[in-house]
Image (tube, rainbow, N blue to C red):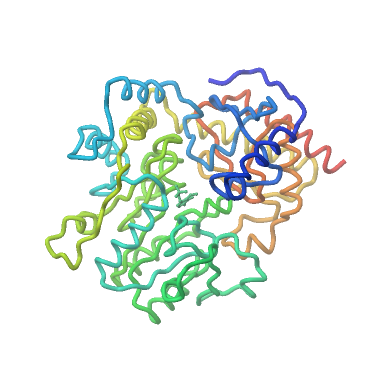
């Protein structure tokens, strides 16, 4: 559990700027993932439980959670013990033959994600989502893929389109048809681009239009859009996708890299009982260690060992199921499933406390805000309703206020990623004191901004 003390020293960005400048001499942009570059740039030096410390020594209560993996908190003691034990025991990444640990992890994983029959492991979410689409194409013999505006599904060509797309690039909201495709990277061949079709979230009619127009192999979507805050499916939407997939024989892929294990050990599918044909995982299931998964129906998963070479899908990776992240994942899943710990009850209680407190403060200062939350994943939108899709969000949310609010909180030692609409995550290491300190800082931040 966290400290009840909190040293609120002033924000000093100079030492962080020096780290970035130094790194930039060798690494383009100065950091290993451009998504980590934010305004302000803060270089962190240490983390424990719910807390972060930057290179100037300033302490923060962390709600960024490294883009959401840390569900138990930073440096969870049981996980560190498990990882250390594996290294001390002389395990290695042998690169030949199966290991008992990968089998143990798979069994434990499927006891959580009980709607899936089988699982494969990778090192990153992007590998898992790319593999999902490859499996879908192999299984169906079709090539087109439906994507959803505002759903981030990784860095690979097949999915790298339309996330937080500026409304000017979209032109107008499109319901019942596809958006212009806006790649989020240069370098995707035109022929590949033509296979991607982006539709609005919560728009079943658009999916039907795509099915009438193209030979669709797969549709991939986050079942709750958690890369643009927390945007939930409308009643009937996910059921409608399931029915369309059944009727038209395309592979429905739920990208649960963020929703997986965050609000329930079974992810979105565990909460709703609605099954994707395939689903992808990462982040929370190993509490910050690099491992990801693809899970789903046997007939799709078994294509990696298909006797029919024309359908056989490659599953290969030097570091797949490296013993360190495997040990970390096993330790994490055991804790997530432990009824005595009641991780999800704890998370939900804290998230409710934060939500209630934030709502009181927004009311006190007359701020138009709608808090959306799925368990410990939360986002305050500065608009008068919960967004139903990206266009709704992009055209209603007060991005300027959101940016200023995040900055004021950072000054006061509360770290949410400083990009408007980014989701906050609470961990098992957070305490009621953390929430109360956060609310006190929120009060002060709103006072500064509005009075
Ligand atoms: N899918 C979703 C829903 C994600 O949020 C992310 C990462 N933010 C990915 C896929 C890609 O995962 P990774 O960054 O581990 O490649």
- Residue at 30% from the left image edge and 71% from the top image edge: 247
Residue 51, x across and y down, in percent: 59, 27
Residue 353, x across and y down, in percent: 61, 32
The answer to whether residue 395 is left or right of residue 344 is right
Residue 293, x across and y down, in percent: 34, 46
- Residue at 23% from the left image edge and 49% from the top image edge: 117
Query: 340 above or below 169?
Result: above
Query: 13 above or below 383?
Result: above
9 or 95, nearer to the observer: 95
Q: Residue 216, located in which quarter of the rendered image?
A: bottom left
Work out which residue is located at the far front of the displayed protein and give it. 25
Query: 124 above or below 76?
Result: below
Residue 164, x across and y down, in percent: 59, 60
- Residue at 44% from the left image edge and 59% from the top image edge: 156
275 or 234, nearer to the observer: 275
197 or 117, nearer to the observer: 197
44 or 209, nearer to the observer: 44
Quadrant for the C terminus, please.
top right
The answer to whether residue 346 is left or right of residue 101 is right
The answer to whether residue 44 is left or right of residue 17 is left
Work out which residue is located at the far left of the displayed protein and give it. 307
Q: Residue 47, located in which quarter of the rendered image?
A: top right
């Amino acid at each position: 559990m966290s400290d009840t003390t909190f040293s609120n020293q002033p924000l000093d960005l100079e030492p962080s700027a020096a780290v970035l400048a130094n790194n930039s001499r060798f690494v383009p942009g100065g950091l290993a993932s451009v998504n980590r570059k934010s305004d302000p740039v803060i270089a962190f030096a240490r983390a424990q439980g719910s807390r972060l410390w930057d290179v100037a020594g300033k302490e923060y209560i962390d709600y960024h959670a490294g883009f959401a993996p840390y569900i138990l908190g930073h440096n969870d003691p049981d996980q560190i013990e498990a990882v250390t034990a594996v290294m001390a025991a002389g395990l290695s990444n042998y690169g030949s033959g199966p290991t008992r640990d990968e089998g143990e992890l798979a069994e434990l994983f499927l006891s959580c994600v009980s709607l899936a029959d089988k699982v494969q492991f990778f090192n990153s979410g992007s590998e898992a989502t790319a593999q999902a689409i490859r499996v879908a194409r192999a299984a169906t013999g079709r090539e087109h893929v439906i994507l959803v505006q505002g759903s981030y599904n990784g860095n690979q060509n097949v999915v790298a389109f339309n996330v937080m797309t500026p409304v000017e690039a979209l032109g107008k909201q499109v319901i019942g048809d596809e958006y212009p495709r806006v790649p989020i990277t240069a370098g995707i061949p035109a022929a590949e681009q033509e296979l991607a079709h982006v539709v609005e979230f919560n728009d079943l009619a658009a999916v039907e239009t795509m099915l009438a127009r193209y030979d669709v192999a797969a549709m991939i979507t986050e079942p709750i859009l958690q890369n643009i805050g927390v945007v939930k499916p409308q009643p009937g939407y996910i059921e409608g996708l399931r029915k369309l997939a059944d009727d038209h024989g395309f592979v429905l892929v739920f990208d649960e890299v963020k929703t997986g294990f965050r609000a329930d050990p079974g992810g979105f599918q565990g909460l709703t009982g609605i099954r994707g044909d395939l689903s992808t995982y990462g982040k929370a299931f190993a509490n910050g260690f690099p491992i990801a998964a693809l899970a789903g129906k046997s007939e799709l998963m078994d294509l990696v060992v298909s006797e029919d070479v024309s359908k056989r899908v490659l599953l290969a990776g030097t570091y797949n199921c490296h013993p360190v992240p495997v040990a970390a994942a096993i330790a994490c899943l055991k804790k997530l499933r432990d009824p005595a710990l009641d991780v999800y009850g704890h998370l939900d209680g804290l998230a409710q406390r934060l939500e209630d407190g934030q709502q009181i403060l927004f009311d006190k200062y007359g701020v138009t805000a709608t808090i959306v939350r799925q368990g410990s994943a939360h986002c305050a939108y500065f608009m008068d309703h919960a967004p139903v899709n990206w266009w709704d969000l992009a055209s209603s949310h007060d991005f300027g206020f959101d940016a200023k609010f995040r900055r004021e909180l950072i000054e006061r030692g509360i770290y949410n990623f400083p990009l408007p609409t980014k989701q906050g995550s609470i961990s098992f290491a957070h305490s009621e004191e953390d929430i109360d300190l956060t609310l006190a800082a929120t009060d002060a931040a709103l006072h500064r901004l509005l009075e």
